[in-house]
Amino acid sequence: MRYDRVCYDCGTRTTAPVARCECGEPLWLETDPGSFDWDDVVDAPGMWRYGPLLPVEPPGGLADAAGGTPLVHEPAVDEFAGARVHVKVEGENPTGSFKDRGSAFGLAALEAGAAGDVSAVGTVSHGNMAMSTAAFAAAADVPCVVMTPTDVPPARLDVIAQYDPTLLKVDGDYGRLYERTLERGLESGVCFLNSDVPLRVEGQKTTALEICEAFAPDVPDAIVMPVSSGGHASGVWKALRELQAAGTIDDLPRLYLVQAAACAPIAEADAAGADAVTPVEGGETVAYSIANADPPSGTRALRAARDTDGAVIAVDDDAIRTAQRVLATQAGLSVEAASATALAGVRKLVAEGVLESTDDVVAVATGTGLTEATAAGSTAATTIDIADLDDNLDAVGE
Ligand SMILES: *Cc1c(COP(=O)(O)O)cnc(C)c1O
Ligand SMILES: [Zn+2]
C-alpha cells in the first residue's frame, strides 16, 4: 500500500510520513474511492466493513471492536431538540470514544509501514485520545508514550495508566509540545498519533461512512458534532468528499460543528467571516475535552463546515449540562459534557430556524460519560434501614 499525503488546501503532495504541508495546513492521506458503492462493503467487523475505502488490511484483535456504533432514535430527544435526532453512540467503542477508530487504523497502518521505520507510538493528550492510543498500542504489543500537561487531574491519569503506557507529564507550552512531537518523533522512532494526523483522520472518517450507509440511498439533512482540534470533523468531511467523488451520494449532509462558548476559536472565526482560525484566550468549560484554544486543524474544520453549507457554532455550559441531562434521563445515554454539545447545538440551530422540525439530524455523541465521574451520585442517594424496605418499595411502586 502507498501512504502519500496531500494538502486539502494547496494540493501539495508528499510521500514523506509527515503531518503538515509546507503551507502549514494539515495533510491527510491521498486515497482513491474509485466507484465505491454500498454493495462494495465487506463482511468484516465494525469500521472494517469499509475496507475498500481504507488503505490497510483489518488487523484483527481489539481493532475488530472499533466502530460499528448504533444510531439511537428516541422521541423524547426529538421533543427536546425540535428536530428528528439520531444519536450516534460513539461511547460504544472499546475505550468509550470515536478516538478508537483513529487508533485502530493508526496502529494497523504503522504495522503496514505507513510511517516508515518506527518502533513505538505516542500521543499528546490527557483525555480520550491518551486512553485510546494506549489501549490499541497495548493490544498491538507496541510501546506507547503518553504526554500530558502537568496539571492533569490524578483520576484521569489513573484511567490512562490501566493500559501501562509510559506516562510523561510535560512542563511547557502544550500547543508547542503537540507540534514538536510530530516534527521530532519519527527521528526517535516514535510515531505520534496526535488528534489531527493523517493516520488518525483516516480511521475517524468511518464515523461518516456508517452514518451515510444507515441513511442510504439518502443522506441525513445534517450531521452535528463537537469540534476541538478538528481531526474528527476533517475525517467526516474527507469521507463525504470520497462518497461524493465515487458517486455514492449526490448531496452532502450539512456539517455543523459545535464548540463550548468559553473556548470557541473556530466558531468565532466562522462568525467573523474569517478564512482562517486564529488562537483565542480560552476559558474554563465543563466540556474540557473540546477546550482547544489553538486547534491544529481549526481552519480545515472551518472549511469542512462551509463547504457543506453548514456552520460552526458555540453553546454555553448551561445548555451543555441540560442536553447532557436530557440524554441520560430521557434516552438512558450517558455522554461526556463535550459530547452533549452536539445535542445542545441541534436545539440551538432549530431555535434559530437553521434546522427544521422535519429534518433528520445526526448528533454525534463522541464519548461516553461513564469514564467521567461527577459528584451527583453521592448526593442523589438516600440511606435507608433494611427494616424500612417494604415501605420504600411501596413508595417506588406508586
Ligand atoms: C477528542 C474529542 C472531541 C473532539 O475531537 P477533535 O478531533 O479533537 O475535534 C470531541 N468529543 C470527545 C468526547 C473527544 O474525546
Ligand atoms: Zn498546503
Image (cartoon, helix red, strand yellow):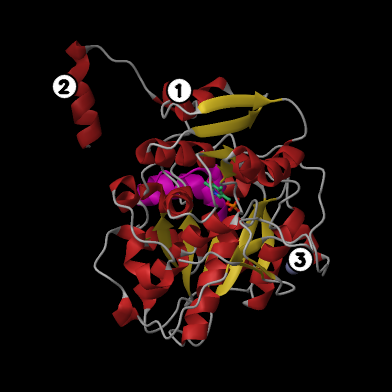
Residues drawn in magenta = 322-342
Mark nearest the camera among 3 and 1 is 3
Disc 2, SS:
helix
Task: Label 1: state its secondary structure.
Answer: helix
Q: Which mark is residue 286?
A: none
Residue at image mark 2: 390
Q: CA distance from mark 2 to mark 3?
A: 59 Å
* For residue 180, above or below residue 3: above
* In the image: residue 307, left or right of residue 121: right
Nearest to the observer: residue 109 or residue 135:
109
The mark total stands at 3
Q: Looking at the picture, how far across and down is residue 367, in whole percent?
A: 47, 46
Quadrant location of residue 138? top left
User: Quick check: is 334 in the magenta stretch?
Assistant: yes
Q: Label 3 to label 1, Cα distance in Å? A: 41 Å
Q: Which residue is mark 1?
A: 379
